[in-house]
């Protein structure tokens, strides 16, 4: 029986399979990134237009995040039973249905339909998020941060391109006879469909099933998110990883979903809003390979602390920005994304390092469920904060919340089995 393929890079075929897996995931992330970012750029504005109130503007983005969290449950169960490919395809298929529903909600002016469709649209986020774990299934322990971060980085291309397609989507929407703000979701539909097709054809053999076979774990793994949460609780490194990802995500989502509205109220054009969001997305993904290398070199715990510090700075800077467009707001959104990159890559690597292959799918699904539920709550509250107190208070609140990562690190610093660097990854 062979040992862990990640622990034995000389295992015949495993290294080549890992390269093909990462390349396929990179391609799907580019296409899925177009779908996600194009919709996110106008989601809050569309929600305000259909609902007629700024206080409900955050619910469109919130339901996308909530949907992604809930969809992680069946995705985790399906991956545990049948592998990564079926689970990822489920996410993209639901996202396509969501994109169609959002367009229809704009046509008929139904806010209820918008919320339901937005939840389904969140399947794209769930698929893109789980893809990073697929990149780690067969990775060498000393390169897990690098391989995982490369898949995160790939979203840069589609996610930066997506918001900048908002402006050009206007004539397309007019030609189709649909509301201008629903035009970007037609492009989202195309991106998700192509991303799913790529995975269906090329993600073979399945990396998770292959990792189990090489390790001799041939029995069906448990896919319950409750089982996953219990597995996380047993490992201090996994606890820090989950906390880091969850806090970093809610800080990012709560500020990001309200920024287009903050700019729109100041008279910023859709093209300029799209540009600022694309800069934010650039910060989220473009530097993730460097983040991955930093994790491999210095450990996930240190990078998690650095990511949280950057998000604190981003929240404080966002709190000082005027309504509308400004250089300081653009910088704040870039830093917000950069800090998110640090928390996501470091937290994800800490989680993978701490878990056995048989526990990965359920625990990773539980992690994304936790991230999504907390971020959905943050997005909903962000709309209320904007309506009652303003964008400056939202920024300050996000900065304070980001401090939860260093607090958690301090409280658990003496726990055993921390994964602090690549030298600890072979136990």
Image (cartoon, grey):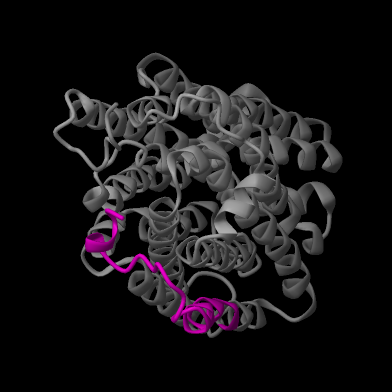
The residue sitting at 64% across, 31% down in the picture is: 99
Per the image, is 316 magenta? no
Q: Nearer the viewer, residue 346 or 400?
A: 346
| Residue located at (42% from left, 22% from top) | 199
Query: Residue 5 or 265: which is nearer the viewer?
Result: 5
Counting the numbered discs, the total is 0
Q: Is residue 308 above or below residue 276?
A: below
Asked if residue 278 lies left or right of residue 19, the reply is: right
Tell me if residue 180 can be seen.
no
The N terminus - image quarter: top left
Q: Residue 416 appears at what percent x and percent y?
A: 43, 72
The image quarter in which residue 310 lies: bottom left
Q: Is residue 50 left or right of residue 211?
A: right
Which span of residues is magenta-colored? Answer: 400-427
x, y percent for residue 282: 36, 56
Q: Is residue 342 rendered to the left or right of residue 269?
A: left
Check if residue 424 falls in the magenta segment: yes
Instruction: Choose top left, top right, bottom left or bottom right for residue 293.
Output: bottom left
Nearer to us in this view, 181 or 302 = 302
Q: Position of residue 359 (x, y in %)?
A: 52, 42
The image shows residue 196 at horizontal and vertical percentages of 48, 23
**Residue in view at x 53 percent, y 85 percent:** 320
């Amino acid at each position: 029986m062979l040992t862990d393929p990640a622990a034995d890079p000389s295992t015949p075929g495993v290294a080549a399979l890992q390269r093909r897996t990462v390349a396929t995931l990179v391609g799907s992330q580019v296409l899925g990134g177009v779908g996600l970012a194009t919709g996110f750029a106008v989601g809050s504005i569309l929600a305000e237009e259909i609902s007629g109130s700024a206080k409900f503007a955050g619910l469109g983005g919130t339901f996308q995040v909530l949907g992604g969290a809930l969809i992680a449950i069946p995705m985790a169960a399906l991956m545990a039973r049948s592998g990564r490919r079926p689970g990822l395809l489920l996410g993209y298929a639901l996202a396509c249905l969501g994109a169609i529903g959002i367009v229809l909600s704009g046509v008929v002016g139904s806010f209820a339909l918008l919320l339901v469709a937005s939840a389904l649209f969140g399947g794209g986020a769930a698929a893109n998020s789980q893809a990073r774990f697929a990149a780690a299934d067969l990775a060498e322990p000393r390169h897990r941060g690098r391989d995982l971060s490369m898949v995160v980085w790939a979203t840069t291309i589609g996610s930066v391109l997506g918001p900048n397609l908002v402006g050009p989507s206007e004539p397309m929407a007019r030609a189709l006879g649909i509301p201008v703000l629903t035009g970007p979701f037609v492009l989202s539909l195309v991106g998700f469909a192509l991303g799913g097709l790529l995975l269906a054809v090329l993600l073979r053999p399945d990396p998770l099933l292959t990792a189990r076979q090489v390790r001799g774990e041939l029995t069906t793994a448990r896919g319950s998110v409750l089982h996953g949460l219990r597995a996380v609780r047993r490992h201090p490194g996994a606890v820090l990883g989950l906390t880091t990802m969850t806090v970093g995500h809610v800080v990012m989502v709560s500020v990001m979903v309200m920024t287009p509205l903050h700019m729109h109220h100041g008279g910023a054009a859709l093209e300029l809003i799209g540009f600022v969001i694309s800069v934010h997305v650039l910060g989220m993904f473009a530097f993730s390979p460097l983040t991955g290398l930093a994790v491999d070199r210095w450990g996930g715990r240190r990078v998690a602390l650095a990511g949280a510090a950057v998000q604190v700075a981003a929240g404080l800077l966002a709190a000082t920005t005027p309504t509308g467009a400004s250089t300081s707001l653009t910088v704040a959104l870039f830093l917000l994304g950069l800090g998110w990159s640090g928390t996501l890559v470091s937290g994800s690597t800490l989680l993978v390092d701490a878990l056995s292959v048989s526990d990965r799918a359920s625990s990773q699904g539980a992690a994304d469920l936790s991230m999504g539920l907390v971020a959905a709550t943050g997005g909903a509250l962000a709309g209320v904060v904007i309506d009652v107190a303003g964008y400056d208070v939202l920024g300050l609140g996000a900065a304070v919340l980001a401090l939860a990562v260093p607090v958690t690190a301090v409280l658990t610093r003496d726990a055993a089995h921390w994964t602090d660097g690549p030298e600890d990854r072979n136990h």
